[in-house]
Amino acid sequence: MHSQPGRSPIRVLREVFGFDSFRGEQLAIIEHVIAGGDAVVLMPTGGGKSLCYQVPALLRPGLGVVVSPLIALMKDQVDALRQAGVRAAALNSRLWPGEAAEIEREVRRAALELLYVSPERLLTPRCLELLSGVRVALFAIDEAHCISQWGHDFRPEYQQLTILKERFPEVPLLALTATADDPTRRDIVTQLQLAKAKIFAAGYDRPNLFYRVIPKRNPLEQLWSFLAEEHPEDAGIIYCTTRRAVDETASWLRARGRDALPYHAGLAATVRERHQERFVRDEGVVVVATIAFGMGIDKPNVRFVAHLDAPKNLEAYYQETGRAGRDGLPADAWMAYGLADAMNLLRLLESGEMTDRQRRIERQKLEALLGYCEAISCRRQVLLGYFGETEHVPCGNCDNCRVPVPSWDGTLAAQKALSAVYRTGQRFGAHHLVDILLGAETERIVRLGHNRLRTFGVGTELARRSWLSVFRQLAAQGFVVPDISGHGGLSLGPSAASVLRGARTVRFRLDASPRERQGARSDRKAGAAATAPDPAAGALWDALRAWRLDEARQQELPPYVIFHDATLSEIARRRPASLAEFAEIPGVGRSKLERYGRAVVAIVSQHPHPVPPPRSPQQRQE
């Protein structure tokens, strides 16, 4: 494959990548960049961002340079491009000096079409001098939200990439990300000197993801029910806030028979690398991780992302859940959320060192996350509304749409709860306050004299679980806030006074039973069933997956680099009997046709379509 100006984007898409049509704004972006324009591309994970720079790099004369933040991501991209017949390489710190020198020689003699490089490597005088001596087709900066000081993966090295426009002013520059609110977008444009760039906002919706938040009660058992019922054999990611929680959760899952691996910064680098490699290359592995895991993972058939603890904001949540279902097939975004999550997040915000302006921004982001968790309406509407997309109708593909959540007028309950906070000196946690409202004469309550308060025993109309839900939702709505000492105490928020005076009403969601919420997706295909073809093609599907895994291990590649699940599913459904028919399968380009066509057609021929039983005379008449 060689860069050939004059070839059409659709021909490259068909011959190299095996697809017949572009999606959304892909073609508009590609044509804009081919013409020499700069672009800021906002496109959801799995939406096809990489094609927006890969296709122009193959059509414009010169070398396409892709700035990527993680070595694992570069390797996946390069492996996939080489499988498609594209001459690609990556310059990173894992290379031996001789390997790096060989890649540099290939750059000088125009033997490469795409070069992936880390921001740290790109900024070295040696690399800048290398690129100054060759023709560069374009620069693409992936994960561009890292540029912004407001971005959730802020990396100072990214801010130095402003040098690209200074040293290569005529070369088209693309900044691409799946996650950027308005402040982050503005930062990207400013930092990269892209004031004249065209902004392509392809939307944030991931329609294949099923969003679900359940009240946290016994989180490990709730997680196990979710996995056992919906994803018994699927690969997925489980996020926890602390390293200790990661280790304990992974051990707990292994004791129950799941292939679960921990991943966090406290593990040795060799262990992290080994666990990531197993997740990428094996089938059905679950990784339990802190947020350190996932940014460089291009595995398309992650069927679920679960949060045992709430993430720090909606951008992080969107980015993390976006690692599920990158192949476009059904996948789950599952979260267990409780009062302690809200308190911990609020406490971390108030105790963190930051400017007043940054604290205001982070507080708004946190309030948006808590509002999402407590939402009564369609979760997708809330999530997309945060990113400025306010015109979406209810999605029908989240827990609130599937099992509508009733709400109730909780003004009186809120007044009782806030009064208990005030009368105890605004320094006690939710469980103690609930004991007071329920009239429980615990040793602590008696010792402190809280059984003599006017609020003692005034809340017997609600059960303990309901009162804890009330305090959780009061925190989410800002009526109570945690102290910053770390002792779990609650104090009144600025808007609490209006509720206590009766000048403001409060509504709460009526939490459904755990079984009701857990089963909100019961009418959808779950896990592997969502990916596999019809039962009649099941044997062929299994044979194709086994062949792919064997082929991937021989080449030391992840299976999805050979073919995505979606491509295997189409093969099993269409049953191509010739190379010509195989070439029509989405995801089969010219290189993969030549490399794998005969093997796949042979496997299909060994699994003929079952012959239906003869119809009865009555059926023939009908």
Image (cartoon, rainbow, N blue to C red):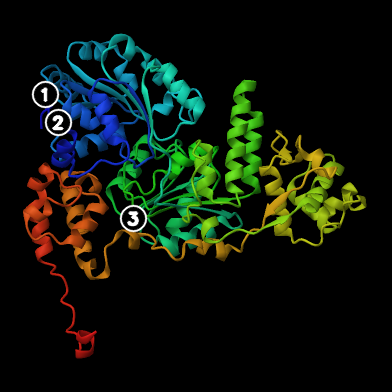
Disc 1: CA contacts within 10 A as few (<14), some (14-19) or many (>=20): some
- In the rendered image, which residue does mark 3 sit on? 284
Left or right of 159: which side holds 150? right
x%, y% of residue 510?
66, 58
**Residue extending furthest front?**
621
Is mark 3 in CB contact (under 8 Å) with mark 2?
A: no
Amino acid type at circle 2 is Arg
Secondary structure at badge 3 equals: loop
| Figure quadrant of the C terminus | bottom left
Q: Quadrant of residue 136?
A: top left
x%, y% of residue 235?
36, 53
Query: Can residue 243 be seen from the camera position used here?
Result: no
| Residue at x 26% of width, y 38% of height | 76
Is mark 2 in CB contact (under 8 Å) with mark 1?
A: yes
Q: Which mark is residue 111?
A: 1
Identify the mark nearer the N-term, 3 or 2: 2
- In the rendered image, which residue does mark 2 sit on? 87
Disc 2: CA contacts within 10 A as few (<14), some (14-19) or many (>=20): some
Disc 3: CA contacts within 10 A as few (<14), some (14-19) or many (>=20): many
| Figure quadrant of the N terminus | top left
Q: Quadrant of residue 313?
A: top right
Q: Which mark is residue 348?
A: none
* Camera-nearest residue between 456 and 564: 564
Amino acid type at circle 3 is Gly
Secondary structure at badge 1 equals: loop
